[in-house]
Each structure stands twice: as structure tokens, then as C-alpha cells.
Image (cartoon, grey):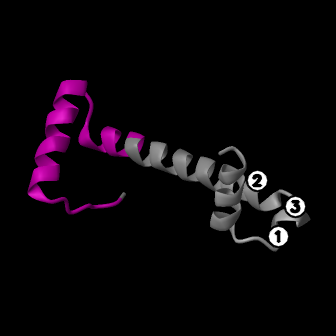
Amino acid sequence: MLTLELELELETCLLEIAREEQQTPAQIINQLVGQYIKSRQSSDLLVNIAQALPVVEVFSEKEPLSLQQEMRDEWS
């Protein structure tokens, strides 16, 4: 069990949401923390995938913004 100190405004909102959803404040907080953890794990997974991508040697010596500008200029 964990005791939280919420700002008065947050506490008021939490109690109102709990009443509307017919749940306890603890249930609402558990759901929100669970969603937060899932979103962090998804974000971490995406970062891990991006880091595992191979390096494309053709672009390794280029500064990304100048490369982007060069590519745009080709289409002008």
C-alpha cells in the first residue's frame, strides 16, 4: 500500500472521476499507472528497435539537416 499526497485540485478531479466511473480512487490510480507503464514499455521497445537498425554507411558522414536540405533541393 502506498499513500499519496495530491494537490487539492487533482484530488478533487480524482474524486469526481471516481464517482462518475463508479470506482474507487485507488482503482482509477491503478488503471492510470498501468496505462503509463504500458506506454513507457512501448516507447522503450521502439527505441530498442531503432537502435538495432543497421548503420547506412552512405549517410554516416553527413549532417542530418544538410542532407535533408540537399534531398529537398534535388526536387526543386
Quarter placement of the C terminus: top right
Label 3: how many Cα within 10 Å (few below 14, some 14–19, many 20+):
few
Q: Is residue 1 above or below residue 18?
A: below
Label 1: how many Cα within 10 Å (few below 14, some 14–19, many 20+):
few
Q: CA distance from mark 3 to mark 2?
A: 15 Å
In the rendered structure, are the residues bearing label 2 and label 1 in contact, judged by CB atoms less than 8 Å apart?
A: no
Query: On the image, which quarter does residue 67 sit in?
Result: bottom right
Eye-nearest disc, 2 or 1: 1
Q: Which residue is mark 2?
A: 49
Label 2: how many Cα within 10 Å (few below 14, some 14–19, many 20+):
few
Q: Is residue 5 above or below residue 73?
A: below
Label 2 secondary element:
helix
| x and y, in percent, of residue 50 in the image | 74, 56
Q: CA distance from mark 1 to mark 3?
A: 6 Å
Task: Give the numbered dot on residue 60.
Answer: 1
Q: CA distance from mark 2 to mark 1?
A: 19 Å
Q: Left or right? Give the position of 9 relative to 74.
A: left
Residue 10 or residue 19, whichever sits in front: 10
Residue drawn where x is 33% and y is 45% of the image? 29
